[in-house]
Image (cartoon, rainbow, N blue to C red):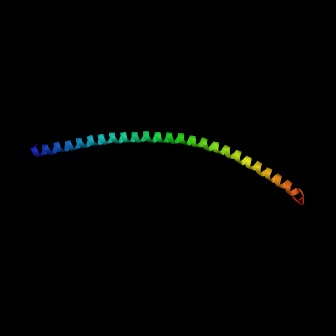
Amino acid sequence: MDKQTIHLITLIIAIIGSNAWSHASLSDRINRVESSLSDRINRVESSLSDRMTALEARVDGIDKRLVIVETSLKANNRYIAKVLGQRLQQPDVPGE
């Protein structure tokens, strides 16, 4: 084999080795990035789940208070209607 052929074979082997090393290095980096992103996504999902639970509890509390307000308003409306109804049934007294 002549010198040029040996250099060409050496160059090809070096390129193949370099590509294999680069591929392994990139693959390792991609795996680390995927793992990091997965961890971050899990933390965000957990945080959002906790916040949703807290918001649902607040909404339930608001719903209960709204029912109390609604019930109170209905009672007030009935009372007002009753008082107005009584006044309408009483004859007007002249001079008052």
- x%, y% of residue 90? 89, 56
In which quarter of the view is residue 33 placed? Answer: top left
**Which quadrant is home to the N terminus?**
top left
Residue at image location 73% in from the left, 49% down from the top? 73
Q: Is residue 2 left or right of residue 41?
A: left
Residue 2 visible? The answer is no
Q: Nearer the viewer, residue 16 or 79?
A: 79
Q: Quadrant of residue 51?
A: top right
Residue in the image at 39% along x and 41% along y:
34
- Eyeballing the image, is 40 above or below 96? above
| Residue 96 position in % (x across, y down) | 87, 58
Please give the name of the residue rendered at 23% of the width and 42% of the height, measured from the top-left corner.
Answer: 18
Left or right, 82 with respect to 65, comes to right
Determine whether, in the image, residue 51 is placed left or right of residue 7.
right
In the image as oriented, which residue stretches furthest toward the front?
A: 95
Residue at point 79%, 52% (across, down): 80
- Find residue 27 and report its horizontal and vertical position in percent: 33, 41
Q: Residue furthest left?
A: 2
Front residue of 21/91: it is 91
Q: Nearer the viewer, residue 3 or 18?
A: 18
* x, y percent for residue 25: 29, 40
Is residue 62 something that shows in the picture? yes
| Left or right, 83 with reference to 44 | right
Q: Is 89 situated above or below 11? A: below
